[in-house]
């Protein structure tokens, strides 16, 4: 698949020697962590065994015994990197994006400027269009077309992508890239005739693939429409936010009509998963960000004892607001939960309980006094119309940053512990995994 112009001429003399046909069985690819002592494969195996003991209907080995590493894609200019894995036995292809590891990745992460999701759209003349983080989009666009070609090439000869399940994942920056790539595939399929979405027409998606792989045009099926997988799932870990509300709406509209599942796993106080924030500046104007997919919030265990909440899934666990979303900062000063709102409710309740026209001012004073004795900083901000829940979450975020937890919870070893506890195990780096 080398595309540089041909230079020079090469003449070779070849002698063919017959090679005996032998059955070669590859060893299964061993899934390891980037941090020494992290053993994701062992944790996964223990989780599957535990589910089987509970007589739950689950595939005993989702990836099959022939899971293999296919190819690593990297762009030297952007440092955008991704690995492709496959199981021909289970007809599964996994696409895993690398997170922040080199200085160039930090530059990619840092910019909060947004650009239209579809290249060629004029954001100045068109309002309310999907826009995404310019650094994330530029990085992914540098490898997305090659990534699609190689994914299509990973399908076994004689089979079609529609027979395969595709899982896309990534941690940190990799999670953001995985989210954008999933959005593209969910809406347009594996269009290998271009990189990310654009107004300009794509090249025939199969043309360069056929030429590169020495395939005859007739062997490429369904040439009119780009191929789509049997199922498409996204699982990101510690992913930052990638786009504005219009992009979020686009992503959500593709659920069940492009992708099957999308979960954004967040470890406790991980600050990266809460960035970039929605900001209003004189130069950039209003730049809004939110996250895609349902939040799956896991907790870092404080001890080996049970009893603490370790897994909360947005839209499934309860009707509470997602703690990773910003929420609405402004509210009525008389809203329930705020200082003035609670005082108002106390006076109202005391008045409703009276059998005469006179109030028992002593009861009201006692109720209000008790509320004032438990005054918190968020109560003060609520007087000015700042939502108390929002204020408390912001204070907690600042405290986690100053204590170092916000950054520590973003790292692999902390995710390993959090995922272990969510699966019912105590998983400490370099130590034996034991059941809670």
Image (cartoon, helix red, strand yellow):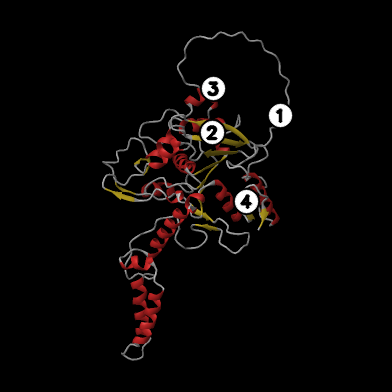
Question: Would you say 129 lies left or right of 141 here?
Answer: left
- Above or below residue 229? Residue 381 is below
Looking at the rendered image, the disc whose residue lies closer to the viewer, 4 or 1, is 4
Q: Residue at x 33, y 72 (%)?
A: 340
Q: Specify which label sits upstream in the sequence, 3 or 2.
A: 2
- What residue would you read off at disc 2? 151
Distance between the Cα atoms at labels 4 and 3?
Answer: 52 Å
Q: x, y percentage for residue 30?
A: 65, 39
Q: x, y percentage for residue 176?
A: 46, 43
- Above or below residue 9? Residue 124 is below
Q: Residue at x 55, y 55 (%)?
A: 300
The crowd level at tag 4 (other Cα within 10 Å; few <14, some 14-19, many 20+) is some
Q: Specify which label sits upstream in the sequence, 1 or 2.
A: 1
The crowd level at tag 3 (other Cα within 10 Å; few <14, some 14-19, many 20+) is few
Q: Specify which label sits upstream in the sequence, 3 or 1.
A: 1
Q: x, y percentage for residue 183?
A: 45, 42
Distance between the Cα atoms at labels 3 and 1?
Answer: 28 Å
Looking at the rendered image, the disc whose residue lies closer to the viewer, 4 or 3, is 4
Q: Secondary structure at mark 1?
A: loop
Q: How many marks?
A: 4
Looking at the rendered image, the disc whose residue lies closer to the viewer, 4 or 2, is 4
Distance between the Cα atoms at labels 4 and 2?
Answer: 35 Å
The disc at residue 216 is 3
Residue 324 location, quadrant: bottom left
Front position in the image: 75 or 184: 75
- What residue would you read off at disc 1? 24
- What residue would you read off at disc 4? 428
Q: Secondary structure at mark 2?
A: helix
Q: Are marks 4 and 3 in contact (CB under 8 Å)?
A: no
- Could you tell me if residue 225 is visible in this image? no
Q: Residue at x 57, y 48 (%)?
A: 413
């Amino acid at each position: 698949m080398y595309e540089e112009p041909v230079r020079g001429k090469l003449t070779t003399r070849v002698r063919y020697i017959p090679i005996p046909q032998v059955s070669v069985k590859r060893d299964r690819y061993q899934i390891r962590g980037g941090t020494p002592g992290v053993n994701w494969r062992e944790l996964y195996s223990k989780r599957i065994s535990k589910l089987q003991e509970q007589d739950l209907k689950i595939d005993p080995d989702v990836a099959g015994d022939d899971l293999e590493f296919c190819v690593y894609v990297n762009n030297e200019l952007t440092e955008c990197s991704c690995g492709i894995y496959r199981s021909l036995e289970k007809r599964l292809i996994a696409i895993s994006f690398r997170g922040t590891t080199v200085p160039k990745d930090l530059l990619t992460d840092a910019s909060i400027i947004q650009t239209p999701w579809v290249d060629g759209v004029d954001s100045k003349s068109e309002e309310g269009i999907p826009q995404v983080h310019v650094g994330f989009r530029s990085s992914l666009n540098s490898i997305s077309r090659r990534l699609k070609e190689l994914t299509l090439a990973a399908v076994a000869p004689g089979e079609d992508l529609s027979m395969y399940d595709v899982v896309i994942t990534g941690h940190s920056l990799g999670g953001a890239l995985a989210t954008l790539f999933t959005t593209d595939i969910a809406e347009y399929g594996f269009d290998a005739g271009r990189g990310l979405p654009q107004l300009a027409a794509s090249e025939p998606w199969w043309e360069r693939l056929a030429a590169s792989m020495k395939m005859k045009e007739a062997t490429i099926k369904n040439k009119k429409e780009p191929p789509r997988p049997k199922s498409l799932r996204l699982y990101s870990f510690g992913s930052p936010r990638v786009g504005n509300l219009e992009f979020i709406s686009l992503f959500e509209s593709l659920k069940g009509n492009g992708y099957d599942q999308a979960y954004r796993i967040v470890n406790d106080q991980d600050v990266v998963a809460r960035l970039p924030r929605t900001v209003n500046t004189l130069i950039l104007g209003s730049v809004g960000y939110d996250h895609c997919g349902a939040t799956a919030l896991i907790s870092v265990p404080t001890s080996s004892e049970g009893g603490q909440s370790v897994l909360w899934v947005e839209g499934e666990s309860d009707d509470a607001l997602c703690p990773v979303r910003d929420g609405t900062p402004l509210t009525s000063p008389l809203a329930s939960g705020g200082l003035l709102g609670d005082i108002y409710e106390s006076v109202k309740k005391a008045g409703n309980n009276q059998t005469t026209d006179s109030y028992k001012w002593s009861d009201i004073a006692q109720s209000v006094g008790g509320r004032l004795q438990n005054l918190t900083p968020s109560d003060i901000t609520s007087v000015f119309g700042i939502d108390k829940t929002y204020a408390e979450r912001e204070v907690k975020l600042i405290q986690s940053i100053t204590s170092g937890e916000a950054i520590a919870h973003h790292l692999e070893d902390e995710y390993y512990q959090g995922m272990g506890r969510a699966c019912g195990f105590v998983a400490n780096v370099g130590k034996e995994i034991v059941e809670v």
